[in-house]
Amino acid sequence: MKISIIGAGLIGGSMALKLRSKGMADFIYGIDNNQQHINEALELKIIDAGTDLEYGVKNADFIILAIPVDAARKLLPSVLDLISDHQTVMDAGSTKAGIVNAVKDHPKRSRFVAFHPMWGTENNGPASAVSDSFSGKAGVICNKEESAPDALQLVEKVAENLGMHLIYMNAEDHDIHTAYISHISHITSYALANTVLEKEREEETIFQLASSGFSSTVRLAKSHPEMWVPIFKQNKENVLDVLNEHITQLRKFKAALEKENYEYLEELITNANRIRGILR
Amino acid sequence: MKISIIGAGLIGGSMALKLRSKGMADFIYGIDNNQQHINEALELKIIDAGTDLEYGVKNADFIILAIPVDAARKLLPSVLDLISDHQTVMDAGSTKAGIVNAVKDHPKRSRFVAFHPMWGTENNGPASAVSDSFSGKAGVICNKEESAPDALQLVEKVAENLGMHLIYMNAEDHDIHTAYISHISHITSYALANTVLEKEREEETIFQLASSGFSSTVRLAKSHPEMWVPIFKQNKENVLDVLNEHITQLRKFKAALEKENYEYLEELITNANRIRGILR
């Protein structure tokens, strides 16, 4: 089939590479405001041709929307305006309630499948795309009852070819869960980077001393605002809830230290260690 | 030479493996309160024999103290009491002011070299030991002017054989820097784990959805209290300073979201992105 990737970056590019290698894509169009991304994606053979939105949408069997969540929410209705009942549109955004609500009453709603692949890195652009990125990761499909059975089946097949295991939930639940297991990690990491940058003027010392522990905690702080501001904006209420809880938890560590209550500190750490049983 | 490892765990065990493979160790004694660690270390050929503290200290040319920082500070004076001027003692603790002050006026102070290898994992015990762990990492030597030249040279040689690059600083500066680039990461990670565990009752959902971003941010939360409570205790003032700054930084994200000031949010993220230029 013919696939159009709107947003030929890290996520769209990685999907294109894998779907082509799996034989699911005969031809891949890339659509991107950033002409350099199109050029890079062509060079890397991620896409076969760059094109404009209207042509790309009209001439593909399957359309992947892999752009920041605010842009995706704005663009999706126009994409659905352009398609017929033989075409399917999937997004790849990290927030789901906003986009699902944006097309709730659209006459072509059933051609859209709301998808979130639980993978990403702190890098962006087609040069960062990796074919096997999604393998073994979770893919979430939201509000599946609002999608046509054949559209849903196609996205399930795509997810299978990407090597993902599927989880189904409604968009509101998805946004609560991701606030906990993805969005807060980014805020923590950004705040940690700012903490160190604020206090450590001798940057050379950070560079020399930084251990693998610090690097892994702060890695997400390299993630770009173009992607993350829209996510925080769309998931504001949930993210604020979790952020408040996180600050409360940090205050417990502060209180334990200030009061030199090391039994309490041990309790807090022992409780956190329970994550061992949950995350490999 | 003969080496005694006090604390045959992750750090001591990893050093033993590497120093043996580099030909620096003819015979390695292991000393550990935990008999199971001795048994495992013997089985894994990390040590050649288990022994008691007095025998191990008296019969080694080089003694590595690789136990939690509170135990190390308490034990070091007794170890120095037992040795002659031909022997050298090195520690491997994550805090340095406490241990250095504990032996400041000891008649054998010059036989001790205060060392901190900037490597660790969330695991412990000899079964987690890896020979190449320290390769490419920083090793910090503190207050080198308080060590005898030959003792210092020996530890420098050991660090070289472990594949580490050396940084010299005084113990107080070390403890400030490590509060920023290691200790705060652990508190953040523990608090993040507690945040998620507090709110997410459906633990299965965390497990299924958790992305690599979450896993890397929360990895350190698996670290054991036996090691980390003493570190936080010994470095309380510095850790509290950094923790307060970190909470302040998190509050900025909270304020930006609450006030829907997305330009400010973007500014905060862009500032955090500067870590890109500092950490690989």
Image (tube, coloured by chain):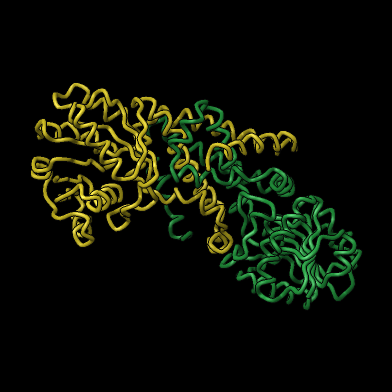
Chain colours: A green, B yellow
On the question of residue A258 being in view, the answer is yes
Residue closest to the eye, A190 or A47: A47
Q: Residue at x 30, y 47 (%)?
A: B11
Residue with the most extreme front position = A43
Q: Residue at x 58, y 67 (%)?
A: A135
Q: Residue at x 25, y 50 (%)?
A: B22
Question: Residue A158 lies in what quarter of the image?
Answer: bottom right
Q: Position of residue A2 (x, y in %)?
A: 80, 72
Q: Position of residue A204 (x, y in %)?
A: 49, 31
In the image, residue B109 sits, relative to residue A271, either above or below, namely above
Residue closest to the eye, A194 or B60: B60
Residue with the most extreme top position = B105
Q: Position of residue A131 (x, y in %)?
A: 62, 65
On the question of residue A146 being in view, the answer is no
Residue closest to the eye, A87 or A141: A87
In the image, residue A83 sits, relative to residue B56, either above or below, namely below
Question: Residue A263 lies in what quarter of the image?
Answer: top left
Q: Position of residue A265 (x, y in %)?
A: 40, 40
In the image, residue B73 sits, relative to residue B131, either above or below, namely above
Residue B120 in the figure: left or right of residue B53: right
